[in-house]
Image: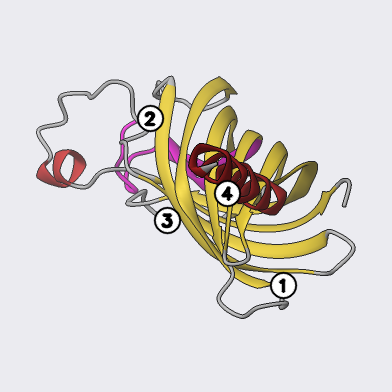
Amino acid sequence: MKNLLLSIAFIAVSISTYSQVKVRPGLRMGLNASTVTNHHNSERVLGLNGAMFVNIHFASFYELQPELTYSNQGYKAERFSGVVDPYDPYFSSSEQDVNTHYLGLAIANKFYFVPNLGLHLIVGPTLEINVSNNSYYDVTPVDLSLFGGIGYEFPMGLGIEARFKQGIIDVRDSFYNFNDEYYYENNKLNSVFQFNIYYKFGM
C-alpha cells in the first residue's frame, strides 16, 4: 500500500510539472541598426533580422527560447584611397556601406516578473557564422555576442521587443602592420540595436 501511494504521488507530481511546460514554435522578424565600434567616423546602418524559434514555457516567470537566426549587419564609413594625406593630389575618400550577413544560434532567456503580464526581460548569448560580406578587410568567420532587451507579449502570442546585441570578438580576421597602437588596442566589435515583432503559434 505504501509503495502504491508513493507511485500515485509521483505520477501526480509528474503530471502537474509536465502540465506547466508548454512548447510553442514561432517566428521573429525586425530591423537592425548596426555599426562596428572604434571605426573612424562610422555610422549605423539599417538591416533586417529574423529567426525561427521554439519557446519552452517552464514556469510563469521563465521561458527558454532557442533561436535559429539571420542578421544583416554592418556600418557606413569613409574609405580612403591613395596616400592618406589631404594635401596629396592622389588623396581621395568615399562613403562605403559595409554589409555582413550572419546565420546563427541564439539562446534567449525570458523572465516575466509580474504574473499575467506580458512584460519581460530578455538575455542570452548568440553564436553566428559570417556567410557573406563586402568589407575591404577580412571579416572573422564566426562572431560571438551577448544580448539583452525588453519585450511585451499580448495574450494571443503576438509580441514586440527591443534588444541590444554586443559582439565580443574583433571582427577583423587579420591585422596589418600599421605600427599603430590605436589600431591594435581598440577592438572593432559588432554593435546592434534590434527592434522586432514575433508570433508564437499554438496555445
Identify the magenta region: 70-94
Q: Residues within 10 Å of mark 1 (few under 14, many from 20)?
A: some
**For mark 1, what is the residue?**
118
Name the side, left or right, on which 6 lies relative to 54: left
Mark before the other along the chain sequence, 2 or 1: 2
**Place of residue 151 in the rendered image (x, y in percent of width and height, measured from the top left):** 66, 67
Please tell me whether mark 2 or mark 4 is closer to you in this view.
4
**For mark 3, what is the residue?**
41
Q: Mark 4 falls on what kind of element? A: helix
Q: Mark 3 falls on what kind of element? A: loop
**Place of residue 124 in the rendered image (x, y in percent of width and height, measured from the top left):** 46, 49
Q: Main secondary structure of the magenta part?
A: strand
Mark before the other along the chain sequence, 3 or 4: 4
- Alpha-carbon span between mark 2 and mark 1: 55 Å
- Alpha-carbon span between mark 3 and mark 1: 39 Å
User: Is 75 colored magenta in this rendering?
Assistant: yes
State whether residue 89 is above or below residue 28. above
Q: Which mark is residue 9?
A: 4
Kind of residue sitting beneath label 4:
Ala
Kind of residue sitting beneath label 2:
Gly
What colour scheme was applied to this rendering of the protein?
secondary structure
Name the side, left or right, on which 128 lies relative to 169: right
